[in-house]
Amino acid sequence: MTDRRHLCYVLPEFDPDTDTHYAHTVRLLEALARHVELHVIVQHAPARPEVPGAHCVGVQTARRRPVRLLQLARLLLSARRHGCRAVYVHYSYSSAVVAAGAGRLRAGARHAAFQV
């Protein structure tokens, strides 16, 4: 077990070939993984995402919304069991709500970025 800080980063979309701002996020995650134990949760991805240096990458596969929310909670709680107490949610209101609920259950820190 490393003494580096752990961070769980929830990303709504992962596609390294996209022309949206998410392409920059892919490079950010690679740089971030050099400084923290990075756990990445991806809500939508066309293929299995790879983040060099990340401790683990989880992808939501469920299609129905209630099941997706439960799957996200399970992934967040799994990251928490592996030492993640800080969760960063990138542009996803539903993920922020689930992360806040999971954080309250497990006394974790919650941080969210939203476009206003």
Image (spheres, rainbow, N blue to C red):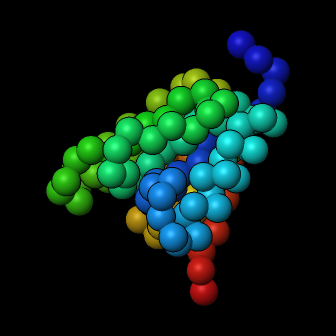
Q: Position of residue 86 (x, y in %)?
A: 67, 44
Q: Position of residue 32 (x, y in %)?
A: 74, 44
> Could you tell whether 43 is left or right of 35 in the image?
left
> Could you tell whether 79 is left or right of 4 in the image?
left
* Above or below 97: residue 50: above
Q: Quadrant of residue 74?
A: top left
* Above or below 81: residue 59: below
* Above or below 108: residue 112: below
Q: Position of residue 33 (x, y in %)?
A: 71, 37
> Could you tell whether 103 is left or right of 94 in the image?
right
Which residue is pictured at 71% across the width and 13% down the height? 1
Residue 83 or residue 53, whichever sits in front: 53
Can the viewer see residue 98 in this picture?
A: no
Residue 116 or residue 83, whichever sits in front: 116
Which residue is pictured at 51% across the width and 70% down the height? 19
Task: Give the quadrant of the C terminus.
Answer: bottom right
